[in-house]
Amino acid sequence: EAANGSAPPPAGGADDAAPPAERSDRGRRKQQSASFIFGSMLAKSGDHNRACEFLAKAREEDPSDPKAHFNLARSVSLRTEPPADLDEAIACYEAGLACCAAGAAPAEARADLAGLLIRQGRAAEAVAQCESALAATPRGALPNRHASYNLNTALRHAGEQKRAIDATWTFLEPRVPRQAVAGGGGEARAGAEAPLTVVCVKWGTKYSCAYVDRLARGVRRHLAARASFVC
């Protein structure tokens, strides 16, 4: 017995002392965690086919966990056997977002969902997801890169070229000194006090980085004013 006369705790520790129902619930949570961690590791290694099995199990064990929905959605959209199912992946993302508290949905999840919606020809819904992701940007933080990229793509697919250009400048301006930006509706300004910054945006895979290098060399060769080049 202990010095104060009370009986010592059971040798098995706190879990053995807990009621059977509570011990069962703890075991379920541990199993869920193992399924989630292993499934996420498989996904990270590129084995999305096997990842789907474990992430689906993790989701069944705790349907209220948004990360289980999001990780499963990504693997479902990238698996090869059975073939990727974009509708199923979209449903997984939407279920995960429904589990998030108001304003707490990860921007990356909304951006990923927007990418799938674009591929399904649902550009207007993709725009809404990207705008929600960007609206949740903390004060003073830079806009989410992935959401900004997909917003531009979704707007172009929706036929809203002007909004797509404006969205791109909204993303670029915090990264480039505002008084040095050439384009975006304003006149280029050069001079000793405010050197010119030339900005280009490389999208997709049609043109390699070699084209950017050629453009930069051409700008420096033909532009009389002092300038920096940003891609």
Image (cartoon, rainbow, N blue to C red):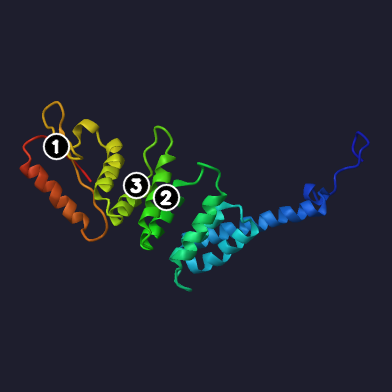
Name the foreground residue: 10 vs 32: 32
- The mark found on residue 129 in the picture is 2
Q: Give the Cα separation between the discs numbered 3 and 1.
A: 26 Å
- Relative placement, left or right, of 50 versus 128 is right
Neighbour class for label 3 at 10 Å: few (<14), some, many (≥20)? many
- The mark found on residue 227 in the picture is 1
Name the foreground residue: 205 vs 7: 205
Q: Which residue is mark 3?
A: 148
Q: Does any portion of residue 144 appear in the rendered image?
A: yes
Q: Nearer the viewer, mark 3 or mark 1?
A: 3
Q: Nearer the viewer, mark 2 or mark 3?
A: 2
Cβ atoms under marks 3 and 1 closer than 8 Å: no
Precedes in sequence: disc 2 or disc 3:
2
Q: Secondary structure at mark 2?
A: helix
Q: Secondary structure at mark 1?
A: strand
Q: Amino acid at mark 3?
A: Ser
Q: Give the Cα separation between the discs numbered 1 and 2.
A: 37 Å
Precedes in sequence: disc 1 or disc 2:
2
Q: Secondary structure at mark 3?
A: helix
* Position of residue 94 measured from the top left corner of the image (x, y, whole percent): 50, 55
- The mark found on residue 99 in the picture is none
Q: Give the Cα separation between the discs numbered 2 and 3.
A: 11 Å
* Residue visible at 20% across and 40% down in the picture: 184
